[in-house]
Amino acid sequence: MRSAVVTGGRGFIGRHLVDALRQRGVAVTTIGRRPSADVTHAVLDEASWDSLALDWILEDAEPDCIFHLAGQARGTPAELAHINGDLVRALFRALKRTGLRPRLIIAGSAAEYGSAIQDGEPVRETATCAPLSAYGISKQAQTRAALAYGDATDTPVLVARIFNALGPNMPTHLAIGDFASQIASMPGNRGTLHVGNIDVRRDMIDVEHIATLLCQLADKLDARGVVNICSGQAPLLRDLVEMLIEFSGRKVDIEVDWSRVRGNEPRTIIGSTDLLETLGCPPPPTDFQGLIARISREMEQGATLLS
């Protein structure tokens, strides 16, 4: 792989992926909604995706692979359907207009599985998806559109179904990012942390490992369809919260906010890594203590700069 385009390249996962690609000597062009000092970054708002502007970016980059990470996790069902579904279809139309045939890696989500998840059993890519949230529904529609495009054009398309990403600078709509932000924002040396149900286990994976796996999979030209991007490890969320508190050095009371508690959620959600291992890309073990320390340190530094 000599060149790549990363949509959503300034996002949480995107930044790590771009760094990993460039470390491998890949020329990377990023596409995002906000400006960047990076001269290889192209600004493209949602309205411009279905236009010649996207064609020009792709033709200039001549990518061997496109990593489509652009998307949205929060919003109304209509907003999520537009961002997560319509943008990928606009990308396909641009590829048809330009005649480019790069490999495509589309960022999916474990939320696509929904009620197909069985408590404590590793969920495999062959599970029949039954998403429960508007986000999961929009990502499943994105997956179906991507696989249909691949079948219709014989384009190598891989949907990377990503589980819970962890790392510094993670967004606060993710649980650990929210908890770290709450703790770092506490005045003085004590405070109250508001949580939902933290007596659950979730498959979590270092964002740097996600970037590495995406790079590795891009070189597996026979890898098509759907593959889980997960660690196969499901730590107890309470343990990670206790680590955040310990690293902060604060005295923190934990208080359940019942508006954050979801009804009838599985106690343990874990992804199967069998297919990753078959493809020769086993995920490395996650050092959760070291990872939480990095997250805590970054949040504390950010809070200090804001104060």
Image (cartoon, rainbow, N blue to C red):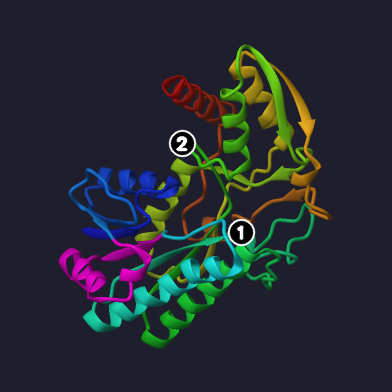
In the image, 109 versus 135, the foreground residue is 135
Sort mark 1 into few (<14), some (14-19) or many (20+) by Cα contacts within 10 Å.
many
Badge 1 is on which residue?
110
Q: Which residues are the magenta region?
A: 44-68
User: As shown in the figure, which amino acid type bears the numbered disc 2?
Assistant: Asn
In the image, 130 versus 302, the foreground residue is 302
> Is residue 64 found left or right of 229 in the rendered image?
left
Q: Classify mark 2: helix, strand or loop.
A: loop
Which x, y percent locates residue 22? Answer: 26, 46
Which residue is rendered at x = 64% and y = 71% of the image?
126
Which residue is rendered at x = 44% and y = 48% of the image?
13
In the image, 125 versus 187, the foreground residue is 187
Q: Classify mark 1: helix, strand or loop.
A: helix
> Is residue 8 found left or right of 141 in the rendered image?
left
Whole-number angstrom distance, CA of label 1 to CA of label 2: 21 Å
Which residue is rendered at x = 61% and y = 21% of the image?
186
> Can the viewer see residue 301?
yes
Badge 2 is on which residue?
169
Sort mark 2 into few (<14), some (14-19) or many (20+) by Cα contacts within 10 Å.
some
The quarter holding residue 152 reads: bottom left
Q: Is residue 158 magenta?
A: no
Q: Is residue 118 above or below residue 11?
A: below
Which x, y percent locates residue 278? Answer: 52, 60
| Count of numbered badges drawn on the protein | 2
User: As shown in the figure, which amino acid type bears the numbered disc 1?
Assistant: Ala
Which x, y percent locates residue 199? Answer: 79, 38
> Can the viewer see residue 1?
no
Viewport quadrant of the N terminus: bottom left
The reply to whether callout 1 and callout 2 are in contact (CB within 8 Å) is no
Which x, y percent locates residue 266? Answer: 79, 53
In the image, 246 versus 126, the foreground residue is 246
Q: In this view, does 300 lie above or below 70?
A: above
